[in-house]
Image: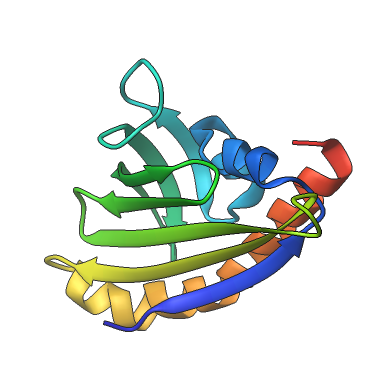
Amino acid sequence: MAIIRESIDVDCRPEEVYQYVMDASRMPEWQLSAVSAERLDEGPVGVGTKVRVTRHVGRRVMPMTMEVTEYDPPRSWGMRGVDGPVRAHVHGEVEPYDQGRRSHVTIDMHFEGHGMGKVMVPLVVRPQVRKELPRNEQLLKDRLEHTGG
């Protein structure tokens, strides 16, 4: 599977970055394709937490459910799509530097296509994400550095 990977440095502590990234309600603030996002369950975020994300995928607007598969604050997280024709697998890492005052953020993504998604992934999804992910990381950086999360 083709993994798409992007990294960026953020002038915020890893704890701040992690808290922001794991807040589903903030996804549309820093992910260009995200129209909306909401938690589907209550309680603390952790492995098994589910989030309903509605995204622009090409010309379509598609709802999809993501499940947290890895939760290791403030170091790493993982999520996977559990329904829909396009299912993302996301792994993120937040590495501290500058004595913990700054963060190096890396996001890896790959996709599974189901049904019509088998055609959409190579023709629409991967090209869209290759363009969008660096812009998303820049938005993440801008949000955290200029609004304090």
User: Which residue is more in the foreground, 98 or 69?
Assistant: 98
Q: Quadrant of residue 143?
A: top right
Colour setup of the view: rainbow
Q: In the image, is 116 to the left or to the right of 55? A: left
User: Which residue is more in the foreground, 94 or 27?
Assistant: 94
Residue at image location 41% in from the left, 60% down from the top: 91
Q: In the image, is 114 to the left or to the right of 4? A: left
Residue 122 pos. (x, y %): 32, 82
Residue at image location 20% in from the left, 69% down from the top: 113
Quadrant including the N terminus: bottom left
Quadrant including the C terminus: top right
User: Which residue is more in the foreground, 129 or 63?
Assistant: 129
Residue 47 pos. (x, y %): 29, 37
Residue 88 pos. (x, y %): 32, 61
Q: Quadrant of residue 41?
A: top left
Query: Seen from this angle, which residue lies furthest front?
Result: 99
Query: Seen from this angle, which residue lies furthest right?
Result: 146
Query: Seen from this angle, which residue lies furthest top?
Result: 43
Residue at image location 35% in from the left, 32% down from the top: 46
Residue 106 pos. (x, y %): 56, 66
Asked if residue 18 is positioned above or below residue 3 in the image, the reply reads: above
User: Which residue is more in the foreground, 123 or 129?
Assistant: 129
